[in-house]
Amino acid sequence: MTTPQVEAFLEMMAVERDASPHTLSAYARDLADAEQSVGPGGLLAADETAIEAWFSGLARRGLSASTAARRRSAVRQFYRFCLGEGWRRDDPSRRLEAPKQGRPLPRVLSREEVLRLLTASSAREGSGGLRMLALVELAYASGLRVSELLALRVEAVRRDPAYLIVRGKGGKERLAPLNSTAREAVKAWLVARDAARPEKAPDSPWLFPSGGASGHLTPRRFAQLLDQAAIDAGIDPARLSPHVLRHAFATHLLEGGADLRVVQTLLGHADIATTQIYTHVATDHLSQLVNRHHPLAREE
């Protein structure tokens, strides 16, 4: 049963802060849970010990860090409201620390799966297959973000460059490498692309032109094409997206012994902590390097 104080708080959230019905419903559940857990008198009578015991118990009950963080927010806002109304003289939730939610690990394809994806892409007939192969090869060889990949201009690749100059987040430029297979795939696509252009029609500035408003292939359409390529390659489409190819680029470089700072530069990450998340899949490889090269390593 909702207390008058909680009802007044939820009414304030709706009227003064324009909280959505979804938010109000979630906060009502969160506060009801706390009311039932903190002992006699509920939230209005609870002390710091009771509030902290309730909060620490959320993890033991199996609640996710994000859910615990929302419940903490609901209770803290409720107590600030109580202070403003004069119903309490202290805030027993003031020492609650936000739970560490961690960072989700990226989905990554194995090298064998990438090869299967490339094979499936190249097996498609006509210019569609050449375009798909160029897209996958470029994404995997360079680690481009999908927005960077689809916004490539055709002039950037006409002269068969060994690397691209890419303008990424914040307008920062970086070099993106192209290996020989990616360059060959791009050259084959350029031949098909140019042949498909109607005679005397102006050339599109984009490497992957489209009839849509943007003038080039959209991330949504690329994702749809990837889904079909994944099915053809025997890969669960749920495990694949344009960004997963960027993850594979970074992870496979680290598995091969690349320096973390180099990978950071190639990906265009401002903070190396963003790049470090890819090291999780290279643990076995790094352990082998230590065992082989460290002077105190012993043979098992």
Image (cartoon, grey):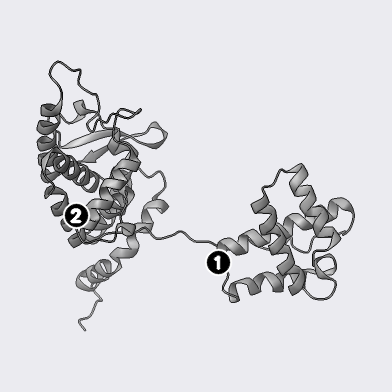
Residue 80 shown left or right of residue 232 in the figure: right
Q: Is the residue 215 above or below the residue 103 in the image?
A: above
Is 51 placed left or right of 57 in the picture? right
The percent coordinates of residue 186 (x first, y second) are 14, 37
Which image quadrant for residue 104? bottom left
Mark 1 or 2: the one toward you? 2
Residue 18 vs residue 196, the one in the foreground: 196
| Residue 260 figure quarter | bottom left
Q: Amino acid at mark 2?
A: Leu
- Residue 73 at least partly seen: no
Q: Residue furthest bottom?
A: 300
Q: Which quadrant is the N terminus positioned in? A: bottom right
Look at mark 1 in the image and give the residue it sits on. 64
Q: Residue furthest top?
A: 200
Which secondary structure lies at badge 1?
A: loop
Q: Which mark is residue 23?
A: none
The residue at 69%/58% (across/down) is 27
Q: Secondary structure at mark 2?
A: helix
Residue sitting nearer the eye, 247 or 193 = 193
> What residue lies at 23% left-to-right and 33% top-to-bottom?
208
Q: Which image quadrant: the C terminus? A: bottom left
Q: Amino acid at mark 1?
A: Ser
Against 174, residue 133 (above or below) is below
Question: In this rendering, would 171 be left or right of 292?
Answer: right
- N-terminal of the two: label 1 or label 2? 1
Residue drawn at point x = 30 percent, y = 59 percent: 108
Residue 76 on image: x %, y %: 73, 58
The residue shown at (12%, 48%) is 122
Q: Which residue is denoted by mark 2 in the rendering?
A: 117
Label 1: how many residues lie within 10 Å, few (<14), some (14-19) or many (20+)? few
